[in-house]
Image (cartoon, rainbow, N blue to C red):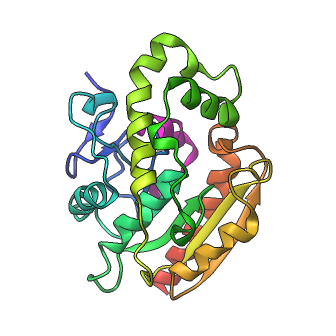
Amino acid sequence: MPSYAARRGNSFRIFSPRPQAQLRLVCFPYAGAGANIYRGWVDLLPPSIELVVAQYPGRQDRYNEPFISDMAALADEIGRDVSGIDAPMAFFGHSLGATIAFEVALRLRPRFPLPIVRLFVSARKAPADCHPNGRAFLGDAAMKAYIRSLRGAGAPMLEEELWQVMAPALRNDLLISERYRYLAGSRLTCPITAIIAEQDATTITLPEAQRWADCTIVSFDSHVLPGGHLYLEDDPATLISLLVEKLQNSLRVETS
């Protein structure tokens, strides 16, 4: 039996249900990843926050489902399912997951007030700066070189058996990124917090992250944390401490 709870539509997984939580933190995986990358966050979050994780088609327990290779179609599917999550909630997305989180949030804009208290975007350029990079059509050798640049030569994903399982999802998600086009002028009505890692300058710089300010009509802030591109896996406690601080402040504002 799977160890997660699958509810609120097919797009989400809850590893430890907290029905009395004050807030749901909805997390979006990076390219090629599945919901399990956030599993360890459960024990780092306070009881007042329930962890809810998006599970994209074609991976882990949705392995037998066809991939979705179009951002709009993926965001539409997740957006339909997210309507079943009790408000308030916050979104967190890392790398490609940040863009997916933003696009899902856009689909909730007709609802006022927006049921999202804050959007956290991690290690990702602002939507207007996401341009084709050619990675979507690379062969295995070039894709492995890309993984080494992010994770190092010893990345477990590079082992042949694991590669055969995970490479199709990565290739699909790079295609999503390649095809993505931002609709100019699309903005949210919730605060945005951008987070980057100090050793991830080849992926994104602080000035680039700060361009997310153009994606909201309210407040914006940015932060630099220690580590490289996958800092959220190397030192999740530092990141979660920042998220919890921001969310607790948001809840105080909501209830004041």
Visible in this render: residue 53? yes
Residue placed most toward the observer, 199 or 231: 199
Q: Residue 150, position in %: x, y?
A: 67, 37
Give the number of marks: 0
Q: Residue 158, position in %: x, y?
A: 57, 19
User: Residue at the location (69% across, 35% down)?
Assistant: 149
Residue placed most toward the observer, 4 or 37: 37
User: Residue at the location (39% across, 34% down)?
Assistant: 169
Q: Residue 162, position in %: x, y?
A: 47, 17
Residue 79, above or below 40: below
Classify the position of the N terminus by image quarter.
top left
Asked if residue 189 lies left or right of residue 226, the reply is left
Give the image quarter of residue 82.
bottom left
User: Residue at the location (21% across, 62% down)?
Assistant: 80
Was residue 188 drawn as part of the magenta stretch in this picture? Answer: no
Asked if residue 213 lies left or right of residue 119, the reply is right
Magenta residue span = 34-52
Residue 73, above or below 110: above
Was residue 51 drawn as part of the magenta stretch in this picture? Answer: yes
Asked if residue 49 lies left or right of residue 18, the reply is right
Q: Residue 71, position in %: x, y?
A: 34, 57
